[in-house]
Amino acid sequence: MSAEGPAEREALAHAAEAGIHRLAIPTPFMVGRVNAYLIEDSPLTLIDSGPNSAKALDELEQQLAALGHRIEDIELLIVSHQHMDHFGLASILARRSGAEVASLGILAPYLAAYGHETDLEDAFAETLMLRHGIPTEIMSALRAVSAGFRAWGSAVQVTRTLEDGEELRMGDRTLRVLHRPGHSPSDTVFHDEDRSILLAADHLIAHISSNPLLARPLGSAPGAEGERPQALITYMASLEQTRAMELDLVLPGHGRPITEHVALIDERFRMHARRAEKIHRLIAAEPRTAHEIAHELWGNVAVTQAYLTLSEVLGHVDLLLRDGLVEERQADGVVSFAAI
Ligand SMILES: [Zn+2]
């Protein structure tokens, strides 16, 4: 676990006074630990669970024990969004505790059919990658990586669906459920209005910008996904909504608590504007595919993290398309972007 500064300790103590405890669970991913949150209320609630691994389960168990609880005590398990580092253990925890499993209604079918859904997502990603200039050999390598990661997730049956805007009532508090898509299509945040605390999962993270990954739209028929989703534009609209909230404390899905959400969101907006400008200059110099732009910006990372960097570039190109600064051209099924 990273060393905690005094500000971080103070913020976590403030959350603990409100009955909300951070459990930092190990993951095999570059992002490091994932934050699950235990809410000591009625029902005893856990938001997110960590990935499907023995190590994650062991640490979760120990951190619960340090707070005087067992897995068997959990009564409600909430899934914040569709990424495996957040829900991988949910099925094991639900089986052991008999807890209700809650998620946004649109996420429930995805979680129930996790394996099949990842097949569809891979196919969706491959279509996008081919269309935007990623060579087939890079794509095959990525397919192998994706297959290797799958087991960190696990299908789970949602027993209680939540809707955007609904109030989740507990003995001592009410959490408002808010859909804030962008980082993923199912991002859900939970607002303890009385205490000015937002449980934000990956919607807002202090030390990294929450990559708006291009994800297959939830609930679409295979092969009928339609236009490519505009993840960054969606994400920025969600951030605007969060920026407008009065919050003392934001508890994110990774890293330290956030006490300055407006300044952080403004910093993100400036970063995205700068990146869009940089991409605009590259496109103005000559028409390029999204993959060529990624390569220009990040070199070999555009190969090892081809889908992530493609998502980054397309997100920013969407801002330029929206502002009428670039246009999309197609030749032989491959898209390139040119300045207007
Ligand atoms: Zn995530």
Image (cartoon, rainbow, N blue to C red):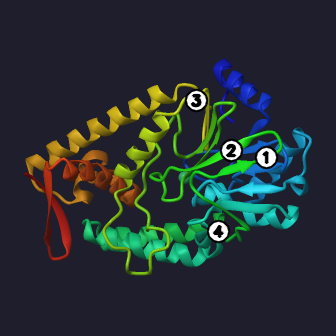
Circle nearer the viewer, 3 or 4: 3
Question: Which residue carries the number 2 mark?
Answer: 175
Disc 3 and disc 2: Cα gap in Å? Answer: 14 Å
Question: Which residue carries the number 4 mark?
Answer: 151
Circle nearer the viewer, 4 or 2: 2
- Tell me which numbered mark, 3 or 2, is placed earlier along the sequence: 2
- Tell me which numbered mark, 2 or 1, is placed earlier along the sequence: 1
Mark 3 secondary-structure assignment: loop
Q: Amino acid at mark 2?
A: Leu
x and y percent of residue 229 in the render? 36, 62
Disc 3 and disc 4: Cα gap in Å? Answer: 36 Å
Pick the residue in front: 326 or 292: 326
Disc 3 under 8 Å from ligand 1? The reply is no
Disc 4 and disc 1: Cα gap in Å? Answer: 33 Å
Q: Are marks 2 and 1 in contact (CB under 8 Å)?
A: yes
Circle nearer the viewer, 4 or 1: 1
Question: Which residue carries the number 3 mark?
Answer: 247
- Tell me which numbered mark, 1 or 3, is placed earlier along the sequence: 1
Q: In the image, what residue occupies the spot 20% across and 53% down?
A: 321
Q: Quadrant of the N terminus?
A: top right
Mark 2 secondary-structure assignment: strand
Disc 2 and disc 1: Cα gap in Å? Answer: 8 Å
Other-residue count near label 3 (Cα within 10 Å), few / some / many at <14 / 14–19 / ≥20: many
Other-residue count near label 4 (Cα within 10 Å), few / some / many at <14 / 14–19 / ≥20: some
x and y percent of residue 186 in the render? 53, 58
Q: Amino acid at mark 4?
A: Ala
Question: Relative to 265, is 166 above or below?
Answer: below
Q: Are marks 4 and 1 in contact (CB under 8 Å)?
A: no
Q: On the rendered structure, is 66 left or right of 331?
A: right
Question: Which residue carries the number 1 mark?
Answer: 170
